[in-house]
Image (tube, rainbow, N blue to C red):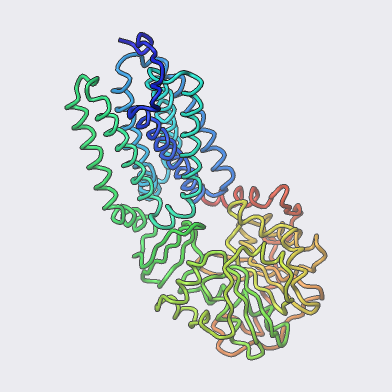
Amino acid sequence: MSDAALPARTPDARGPQPVEIALLASVFVVAACGLVYELSAAALSSYLLGDSVLQFSTIIGTYLFAMGVGSWLSRYFDRQLPAHFLRIELLVALIGGALPAILFLANAYVPGAFRLLLYGLVVVVGTLVGLEIPLVMRILKRNIVLKDLVSQVLTFDYLGALAVSVAFPLILVPQLGMIRTGLLFGVMNAAVAVWALWLFRHELRRAGAHAVACFLTLAALIGAFWGADHITTLAEDKFYQDRIVFSASSPYQRIVVTRGALGHRLFLNGNLQFAERDEYRYHEALVHPAMAAHGAPKKVAVLGGGDGMAVREILKYPSVESVTLVELDPNMTQLFTTHETLAALNGHALSSPKVKVVNTDAFQWLQQEGDTFDVIVVDFPDPTNFAIGKLYTNSFYALLDRRLSASGYAVIQTTSPLVARKSYWTVATTIESVGLKATPYHAHVPSFGEWGYIIASHRPYRLPDALPGGMRFLTPATLPLMFDFPLDMARVPAEVNRLSNQTLVTTYEQEWGKVMAH
């Protein structure tokens, strides 16, 4: 018998019946699970492919389109609706729950197929999720009049989405990680299937077979949940090659520290931040041209640089009275303060009484009224997405200008002028657009290649005559060479990077994308 042939019944005057309550509760769970799978796919694509706005937009758009396809396909399900609903829940549980784990493994073992697999899974899961709500509504319409049916189903649907949208970045990913979060909600989807099996046990023709399917699905998901650490290790060991000594997911990023023949390396969202074997080159080049040129800096700020390496170099100057480190992610500063091996890399700089750590967004911190600084070291990751790209805009540099003393210097790490030539000079153009003088220079860091920096100041920059003792890379004699640009890195015309266009992110992706493609 089709659902159209079932007689509609007037709702019981005593209130909602157990079946109705159970199905409305399942709507809440279904909505929550569906959004988790959508957010997981979007977050993973932004982690691994960069450009968070583009990735979130395309993933969410594809997912919503697939849900529309699923809703349209639901019209072809006429008989045994509870059985169809149960099967769909189990499929969503398995595919959606395993989605983060599958994508992590694909990125490590078959990176060339990652994008195809990503969108394929999004289409499959979105289509299945799109089938769920129409089937629930058609089952419920046996007992609830249409106007109440629509309002109740949509209310529970939106409530489930709200709960997950808040919990996903603040609780689920930081506490469980992406893989366990997906598997947990896969278990919840499978639990809805078990619930449906009990509620409709008298209607199902092959209840025994459905029970076995539910058991096997739950067993697979729960087993994978408990083995999630092994899955993560399997994927990350292949991706990073060296042994992983620390890994964690924060609301802001995936932090991985590896150790191999060449020492420790730090990765944020899969992007190398430093390698122990040559980080001294990067950080000496970042800090000392500005610090030594100032003469006797007393108040210094570091924006980004939560690993403490830049702070280590700054503390080599006896004149320094205070260092304010502004780092968004408290996991980073805690890791490089308390982890014995990693704290040793920065010489326990973050434990110095001169250092004050502020865990907040640097853009917001600059907007506040506060002290000016003799030197500001800006050590952010490259502008791989718009969230980071805002820290390279003219709006950001205008705020930086306000917090820089009249005789002060700010130094900004600025990607590779060889690989991303236009991106590099875009930053110089943007700094100059707010009235600051831009003095570009570069250094060779083997782990990164030719790397660029820019000093921003109110006064013309002058090379220092001396450097602190203990340098491993810089000398007063070789310092001038860093300010000379060969023809293949010479200045090219570039636009100002503004909050309203974020042209730098697009340019950066294009230039580095060509390198990665080869």
> Residue visible at 37% across and 31% down?
21
In-image side of 322 versus 332 (left or right): right
* Quarter containing the N terminus: top left
**Residue 8's spot in the image, x, y percent?**
39, 13
Q: Is residue 518 visible?
A: no
Q: Residue at x 74, y 70 (%)?
A: 369
Q: Residue at x 41, y 25 (%)?
A: 131
Front one among 513 and 374 = 374
Q: Observer-nearest residue: 306 or 180?
A: 180
Name the spot of residue 184 as percent of width and height, x first. 34, 46
Where residue 71 appears, as percent x and y from the top left, is: 46, 23
Pick the residue in front: 277 or 123: 123
- Residue 219, x across and y down, in percent: 22, 42
Q: Residue furthest front?
A: 14
Indicate whether 209 appears above or below 462. Answer: above
Question: Which residue is pictured at 38% across the width and 42% down the height?
Answer: 99
Left or right relative to 188: residue 250: right
**Residue 77 shows in the view:** yes
Quarter of the view holding residue 86 = top left
